[in-house]
Image (spheres, grey):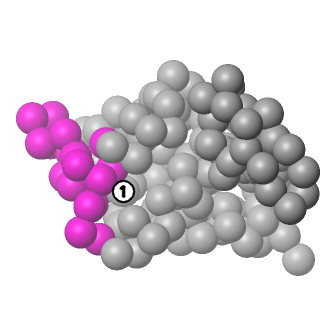
């Protein structure tokens, strides 16, 4: 067990960083009516569109040449997702986005958007920002 101290008090962590413990308090995404999302999740959707991920994974993330991300993110950890996006899977035709600044700067938001789709909280691929 490891203890982390902060100005907010003591956080007890079992192999978890302070940032991870703090992140656990905040939801990964917020969705209203199945398609209205918070600003960070909206950044993830915009990153999805800008990187043209739909060319391989389909407009609804349900797969085409590449696998269904709706299914894959049910079992893929965030670390595995980041590694795959960053490094690619060249043997399977997945390009690397490690040098794509927009993708790498918004990898957490992209994950949140796709995880929301996979979890069924985001019920359609095209989303709007909650006002």
Which residue lies at the image location 19% right of the left edge and 52% below the top edge? 95
Query: Label 1: few (<14), some or many (≥20) within 10 Å?
Result: some
Q: Is residue 130 left or right of residue 58?
A: right
Using the image, determine if residue 79 lies above or below residue 5: above
Magenta-colored stretch includes residue 109: no
Residue that protrudes farthest toward the left in the picture = 91
Which residue lies at the image location 90% right of the left edge and 57% below the top edge? 8
Q: Confirm whether residue 49 shows in the render.
A: no
Residue 104 location (% of width, % of height) = 39, 65
Number of numbered discs on residues:
1
Residue marked by disc 1:
53
Quarter of the image where the N terminus is located? top right
**Front residue of 76 and 7:** 7
Quarter of the image where the C terminus is located? bottom right
Find the magenta span and give its range: 84-100
Which residue lies at the image location 48% right of the left edge and 59% below the top edge? 107
| Quarter of the figure with residue 38 | bottom right
Q: Is residue 123 left or right of residue 105?
A: right
Residue 6 location (% of width, % of height) = 80, 56
Q: Secondary structure at mark 1?
A: loop
Which residue lies at the image location 60% right of the left edge and 29% below the top edge? 15
Using the image, determine if residue 44 lies above or below residue 67: below
**Front residue of 119 and 29:** 29
| Quarter of the figure with residue 66 | top left
Q: Confirm whether residue 83 shows in the render.
A: yes
Residue 54 location (% of width, % of height) = 38, 55
Using the image, determine if residue 81 lies above or below residue 99: above
Residue 75 location (% of width, % of height) = 51, 22
Q: Is residue 36 left or right of residue 56?
A: right
């Amino acid at each position: 067990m490891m203890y982390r101290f902060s100005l907010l008090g003591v956080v007890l962590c079992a192999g978890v960083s302070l940032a991870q413990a703090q992140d656990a308090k905040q939801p990964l995404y917020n969705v209203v009516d199945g398609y209205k999302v918070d600003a960070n999740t909206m950044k993830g959707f915009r990153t999805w569109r800008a990187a043209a991920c739909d060319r391989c994974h389909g407009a609804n993330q349900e797969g085409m040449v590449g696998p269904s991300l709706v299914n894959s993110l049910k079992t893929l950890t965030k670390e595995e997702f980041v590694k795959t996006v960053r490094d690619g899977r060249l043997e399977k035709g997945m390009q690397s986005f490690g040098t794509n600044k927009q993708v790498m700067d918004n990898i957490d938001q992209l994950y949140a958007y796709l995880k929301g789709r996979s979890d069924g909280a985001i019920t359609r691929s095209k989303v709007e920002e909650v006002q």
